[in-house]
Image (spheres, helix red, strand yellow):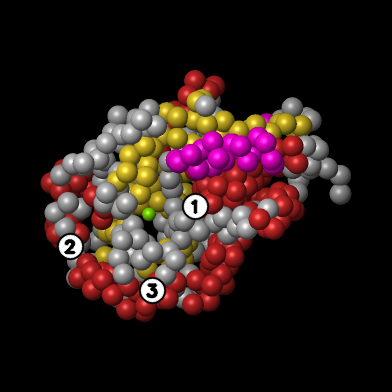
Amino acid sequence: MPAVDAIRSVEAFIISIPRDVPYLGPLRPGETINAKGYIIRHGNRSIYPSTDMSVLVKITGESGRVGWGETYGVAAPQAVTAIINELLGPVLIGRDPGQPVVIHEDLYDLMRVRGFFGGFYVDALAGLDIAIWDLFGKALGQPISTLLGGRRHDRLPAYVSGLPKATLQERCDLAVEWVAKGFKGIKFAAAMSDDGIVAEMAALREAVGPGIHLCVDLHWKFTSGEAIRLIRRLETYDLYFAEAPCQPEDLDGQVLVARGIGVPLALGEEWRTSFEYRPRFERRAMSVIQPEIGHTGVTEFLHIGRMAHAFHIDTIPHASIGIGVFMAASLQATSALQRVPYHEYQHSIFDKNLAYTTGDMACANGFYTVPTGVGIGVEPVDAVFNYVVG
Ligand code: MG
């Protein structure tokens, strides 16, 4: 089989795009932006950047074609760019982008001896993997959904993720606005439910009325017993799914919750490989998975999505802070899967950053448009490089 191209160079960039209101909404009492630009959110004990931070990956072939990838840069992105620029980039020189899965397997193997099965290392692999698939698609003149077995969906239902407003009344008003725009699914972040999670659910249901899919992200805050008691109360307001109630280390707890509640349990945004998903599939620890392509790359995303299909488990992909490159890859890969009731829509990120990519990717009237261009279907615009830092 002749090579489609040969990789000539690999570069990774840290992008930091300012935003007016931090992700997850205005700062709560006691929350501040520290000297390095990070915020600790007390509601879920997690650290976030105050800007939209991301890692952009550029792979250039001997043909001159460029493949674009992106991975998580929300915290210490220098770790990821060091892995790409210092370690993996040089290894990729000369490799054929027509072999994305082979390359992904080879790179994953390189650090097994040192125990790197996840975290920053696999994020770096994800960014490279997306760029290699993009280059492959461009070499063949096809969108990557075609290379992945064929596009099943040109549009994907989008659920609105997060209501980043300071008060419950404002969050209810915002939910009603999204319903008026044609969106049928909305998820609220319990970490921001200052008036109580059940009160927030009740108020949102009252505001949007019946027939809207209301979901809650519980941000790993509860023991399994606490989660079951809480979710069963939320069910009385017709909850669509409950996300991430227990700490990811507690597999038995996840299984207890999945069995103890009457609505789908959704998990998986923080897992990066099929190895992490497999025991959860086997134990039926959830009935919806939420793979994040910024962590998995295209190769593992598809692998995980096909495994979910075999277990009769739905896939509702995660969406996170990025400039739109891994978002496009996620829509491409999701469009090749069968059981995808929704894809997450981070409106406060997606809409703001859509200007930083080319192509026809869009989200309106409750649906994403899967980009139609070759490769992942979008490219960063030159203005993105005004936001390179570090
Ligand atoms: Mg979440």
Q: Is residue 255 left or right of residue 11?
A: left
How dense is the environment of label 1, judged by Cα within 10 Å: few (below 14), some, or many (20 and up)?
A: many
Residue position marked by numbered label 2 in the rendering: 198
Badge 2 amino acid: Val
Tell me what residue is drawn at x 55 percent, y 40 percent. Answer: 79
Residue position marked by numbered label 1 in the rendering: 292
Tell me what residue is drawn at x 27 percent, y 49 percent. Answer: 42
Pick whichever, 240 or 91, lies toward us.
Answer: 91
Q: What is the distance, in whole Å, between disc 3 and disc 1 at their CAs?
A: 22 Å
Task: Report the residue that reaches farthest toward the right.
Answer: 1
Please say if the residues under marks 3 and 1 sit with CB atoms less than 8 Å apart: no
Quadrant location of residue 351?
Answer: top left
Q: Position of residue 10 (x, y in %)?
A: 69, 33
Residue position marked by numbered label 3 in the rendering: 253
Q: Is residue 325 left or right of residue 107?
A: left
Q: What is the distance, in whole Å, between disc 1 and disc 2 at their CAs?
A: 28 Å
Q: Position of residue 312 (x, y in %)?
A: 50, 73
- Depicted 313 relative to depicted 269: above or below: below
Q: Which residues are magenta?
A: 66-88
Q: Earlier in the sequence, mark 1 or mark 2?
A: 2
Q: Nearer the viewer, mark 3 or mark 1?
A: 3
The answer to whether mark 3 is within 8 Å of ligand 1 is no
Q: Secondary structure at mark 2?
A: helix
Q: Position of residue 43 (x, y in %)?
A: 26, 51
Asked if residue 86 is among those painted magenta in the image, a careful observer would answer yes
